[in-house]
Amino acid sequence: MLIGGSVFIAGSVFGGAATNIPMLLMNRILLGIGLGFTNQSIPLYLSEMAPPRYRGAINNGFELCISLGILFANVLNYFVIKITAGWGWRISLSMAALPAAFLTIGAIFLPETPSFIIQRDGNNTDKARVLLQKLRGTASVQKELDDLVRASDLSRATRYPFRSILERKYRPQLVVALLVPFFNQVSGINVVNFYAPVMFRTIGLKESASLLSSVVTRLCATSANVVAMVVVDRVGRRKLFLAGGVQMILSQFTVGAILAAKFRDYEEMGDGYAYLVLTTLCVFVAGFAWSWGPLTFLVPAEVCPLEIRSAGQSIVVAVVFLMTFVISQTFLEVLCRVKSATFFVFGGWICLMTLFVYLFLPETKKLPMEQMEQVWKTHWFWKKVVGEEADRKEAGAGNIALSGLS
């Protein structure tokens, strides 16, 4: 977090003071590096510090803060575009230093997680015990401490987590770490985040109205993030995934149908239909913001055991940014060629990812992270994968024992 925040500050300086293209490129490169560090470390930190019964709500605070940041950026852009002197963009780029400074300074005063303290100090668990008692508000933390010690012992024996996560026994975690962020991006959410003003201008809204429409959609997302924080530990992750998926499917198909019926090349859509598209996209963004948005970072961090947790979260972040790049580079070209069918494609992907959750993703609410392997052993599909690996190891151990007796 310290490194990420510091790099953010450096990147914002290059952006605000840019006098040429290389300085702007350096701004983007440094901000990208900062995003990589912070998106990997912050969800992990929140998950490891939070008590199990509130882990979903606390981790969802990460997505809420992202939504607030995008909202503030949209509001800032709406006002700086009115600066006629032409230097408003410098304000937009340099303001990234403000939240980065809060992150960097705040991280100095944050304690390490109990898991990290145990890994670092070995058998000396006094510091971890004191921190757990402070975090949980009770002196009765021995069971959780014992779970952390066992997980830490196994983690120390794992020298290469990126190699280990490819082993068969970690196949469920690897699939979740790959597919959940992949599906997150092919839902079309970053099309709305990146290109909403372009789309709204294309269908007939003026430039200022287009930017204001982006503010409206982000307000809907922020409100939905708050709802997710309230209900995620009550109703569970699966129900939010499924409910949000249905809401997003209907929204994408509706937008595609409206554009197919009412939008033509080189013609502006009537204001009534343009605002209907805006309303439908608000419903879509809200569905994403209380389901796939926050849960994309929460669930992989929950299901990965300590020995591969950092590797799993790194895979999540890498897949998110890789797919963000692919979609941001191809969407406008695809939209120009297939037009409204683009939104039916996104709707098809959401159908597929909702089916994936229904069939293959178990519920993880309120279960301690160090006991998460239980969900795979009882799942109708994954218990075969995990069970076969356990049987293979047991058979191998038996053969070794027999060889020793011989």
Image: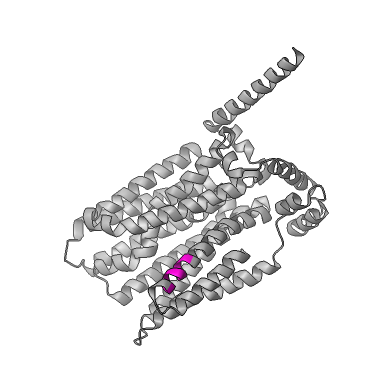
- Seen from the viewer's position, the closer of residues 144 and 393 is 393
Q: Quadrant of the C terminus?
A: top right
Q: Position of residue 12 (x, y in %)?
A: 50, 74
Question: What is the tally of numbered marks visible in this picture?
Answer: 0
- Seen from the viewer's position, the closer of residues 212 and 342 is 342
- Magenta stretch: includes residue 27: yes
- Seen from the viewer's position, the closer of residues 272 and 403 is 403
Judged left or right of residue 20, residue 136 is right
Q: Give the residue displayed 33% in from the left and 69% down from the top.
A: 197
Given the current orientation, which residue lies at the most extreme bottom position? 85
Magenta residues? 23-29
Q: Main secondary structure of the magenta part?
A: helix
Q: Give the residue displayed 60% in from the left and 37% down from the top.
A: 375
Q: Position of residue 333 (x, y in %)?
A: 26, 57
Residue 52 visible here: yes
Q: Hey, which quadrant is residue 9 in on the image?
A: bottom right
Question: Relative to 92, does residue 259 appear above or below in the rendering?
Answer: above
- Magenta stretch: includes residue 14: no
Q: Position of residue 176 (x, y in %)?
A: 51, 43
Tell me how the rendering is colored.
Answer: one colour
Question: Relative to 86, does residue 336 appear above or below in the rendering?
Answer: above
Q: Quadrant of the N terminus?
A: bottom right
Given the current orientation, which residue lies at the most extreme top position? 406
Q: Hey, which quadrant is residue 331 in on the image?
A: bottom left
Residue 296 visible here: no
Q: Position of residue 193 (x, y in %)?
A: 39, 63
Q: Give the residue displayed 46% in from the left and 44% down from the top.
A: 179
